[in-house]
């Protein structure tokens, strides 16, 4: 028991180490701040043009458009997270550090999740200002965002590792990732329909699905990340 | 170094562990029986089985649609199993099997989607119905499998391609269940025809034809997977062959 507790603490420490490393790199390179966030806002504006700035349509579609934008941002953030490891053989060094692959996966996913949360934090006021949305249940919006971004980051980091070190990775990642995260788009959109008062659905039950998706994909990542690290 | 002989099975065979062809006596007869079975199902389904009281002639599409749907999921199951076995045992055999299953799954998923839409148009009045959970799930599965094949095409060493593809197969297999569940909750209903088979609503002749269609589909899948497996096996051998040939050439130059 004591040993297990120690192992868990070690694992948590390593996850924190990797996440902090990735976030520090992001902070210094300003990729999320300078590229991902403006990209997400740009998509919101473009959706406005695409739907002819029709306010009732925009209000109705707000939850879906918001999460569609987060999905696009996920692709960009994961590609960035993969690219960081491919420079100067950093991924190989990570493998040689002797750290458990599950910890490396957890850390990479956590860093992506934090960035995606930042994206949601910008998009939410964005839809209030641009689309006239009103937040009726902030706790639901926050919890759904936490669960959804965690799931997106887990699935994204695992599939990102699949294409790591491959020349065509930028074009392949979206084909791999977007079909698999369809449940997140469905569930997060439904939860936000409730949180923004757009539809009479029970958003919390959809949060349950998001949590299930996250747990499953974190488990898959913890198991499958090791073999992938060795191949990259 | 000459590359002559690549197209000649007999000369190629000298470098290979097994036969240099994808066919065998068994697959020849399996293929012939499958073709005969297709003809039988077509004759029964189009000419003998009576039209449905409600759906009319459109019901005949089940003889293609239902076997290809089940076949697609069976082939996908083979890919999932092969993926897990590769990650567990690192057996080349399972990796090639997973690849063979994936190609067959993409083909059958496509057939399921096309026949489903062709049936939906006269029956529901629309090609695509978002409320149909099974059709939507199959489309997602189709896209996942296309992604799987694109990972296989990325290139790299055989081992790294196998591991990358196996993870995609595993992730797809686990997540397709969640996709199905979420689409089910989302649509909150299913337009899909409930299984006529389990409800015992099919007439004897229709049922017999459907059972025959299942058997023929299983034979066709078996035939395709075996051939695709052998192609995959020969591809590996061919990749090694060039190395063997180069080694022999160097040794000959050195007079050893």
Image: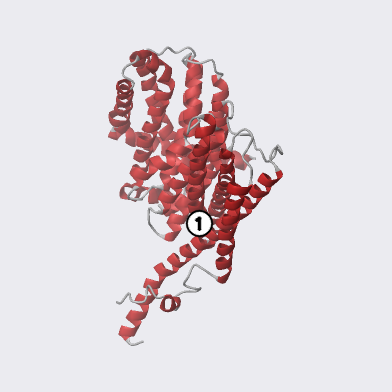
Asked whether the viewer can see residue A9, the reply is no
The x, y position of residue B233, in whole percent, is: 48, 65
In this view, the residue farthest toward the bottom is B255
Question: Where residue B71 appears, x then y in whole percent?
Answer: 57, 49
| Pick the front one: B48 or B90 | B48
Residue in view at x 39 percent, y 22 percent:
A121
Q: Residue at x 43, y 39 (%)?
A: A177
In the rendered view, would you say A131 is above or below B69? above
Q: Position of residue A54 (x, y in %)?
A: 34, 15
Report the residue marked by disc 1: B100
Q: Which quadrant of the structure image shows residue A152?
A: top left
**Relative to residue A223, is residue A51 drawn left or right?**
left
Residue at 37% x, 12% y is A132
Q: Is residue A125 above or below residue A101?
A: above
Q: Position of residue B243 (x, y in %)?
A: 37, 72
Q: How is the image coloured?
A: secondary structure
Q: Is residue A169 left or right of residue A152?
A: left
Marks counted in the figure total: 1
Decide which of B203, A123 is in the foreground and name it.
B203
Secondary element at tag 1: helix
Residue B62, can we see it? yes
Please name whichever residue, B169 or A116, is drawn nearer the observer in this view of the structure.
B169
Question: Which residue is drawn at the image coordinates 32% and 74% (left, top)?
Answer: B3
Q: Nearer the viewer, residue B127 or B236?
A: B127
- Using the image, name the chain to which the residue with label 1 belongs: B
Q: Quadrant of the N terminus of chain A?
A: top right
Q: Residues within 10 Å of mark 1 (few under 14, many from 20)?
A: many
């Amino acid at each position: 028991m004591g040993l297990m507790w120690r192992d868990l603490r070690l694992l948590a420490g390593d996850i924190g180490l990797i996440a902090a490393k990735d976030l520090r790199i992001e902070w210094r390179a300003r990729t999320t701040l300078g590229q991902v966030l403006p990209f997400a806002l740009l998509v919101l504006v473009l959706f406005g043009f695409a739907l002819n700035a029709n306010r009732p349509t925009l209000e109705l579609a707000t939850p879906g458009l918001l999460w569609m934008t987060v999905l696009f941002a996920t692709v960009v953030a994961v590609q960035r997270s993969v690219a960081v490891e491919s420079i100067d053989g950093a991924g190989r060094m990570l493998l040689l550090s002797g750290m458990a692959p599950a910890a490396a996966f957890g850390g990479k996913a956590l860093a992506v999740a934090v960035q995606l949360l930042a994206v949601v934090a910008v998009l939410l006021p964005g839809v209030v200002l641009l689309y006239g949305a009103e937040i009726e249940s902030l706790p639901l919006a926050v919890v759904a965002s936490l669960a959804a971004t965690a799931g997106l980051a887990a699935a994204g980091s695992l599939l990102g590792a699949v294409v790591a070190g491959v020349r065509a990775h930028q074009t392949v990642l979206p084909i791999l990732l977007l079909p698999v995260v369809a449940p997140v788009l469905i569930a997060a959109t439904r939860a936000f329909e409730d949180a923004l008062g757009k539809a009479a659905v029970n958003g919390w039950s959809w949060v349950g699905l998001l949590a299930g998706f996250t747990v499953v994909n974190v488990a898959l990542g913890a198991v499958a990340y090791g073999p992938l690290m060795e191949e990259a | 170094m000459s590359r002559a002989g690549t197209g000649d099975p007999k000369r190629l065979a000298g470098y290979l562990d097994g036969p240099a062809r994808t066919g065998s006596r068994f697959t020849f007869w399996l293929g012939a029986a499958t073709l005969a079975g297709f003809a039988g199902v077509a004759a029964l389904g189009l000419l003998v089985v009576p039209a449905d009281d409600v759906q009319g002639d459109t019901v005949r599409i089940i003889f293609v649609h239902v076997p290809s749907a089940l076949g697609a999921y069976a082939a996908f199951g083979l890919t999932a199993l092969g993926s897990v076995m590769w990650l567990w045992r690192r057996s080349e055999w399972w990796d090639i099997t997973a690849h063979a299953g994936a190609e067959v799954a993409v083909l059958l998923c496509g057939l399921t989607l096309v026949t489903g839409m062709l049936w939906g148009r006269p029956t529901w009045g629309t090609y695509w119905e978002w409320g149909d959970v099974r059709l939507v799930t199959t489309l997602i599965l189709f896209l996942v499998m296309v992604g799987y094949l694109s990972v296989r095409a990325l290139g790299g060493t055989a081992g790294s391609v196998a591991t990358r593809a196996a993870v995609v197969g595993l992730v797809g297999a686990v997540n397709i269940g969640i996709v199905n569940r979420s689409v089910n909750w989302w649509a909150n209903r299913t337009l899909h025809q409930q299984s006529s088979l389990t409800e015992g609503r099919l007439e004897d002749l229709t049922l017999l034809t459907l059972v025959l269609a299942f058997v023929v589909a299983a034979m066709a899948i078996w035939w395709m997977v075996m051939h695709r497996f052998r192609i995959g096996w020969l591809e590996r051998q061919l990749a090694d062959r060039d190395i063997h040939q180069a080694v022999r050439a160097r040794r000959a130059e050195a007079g050893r």
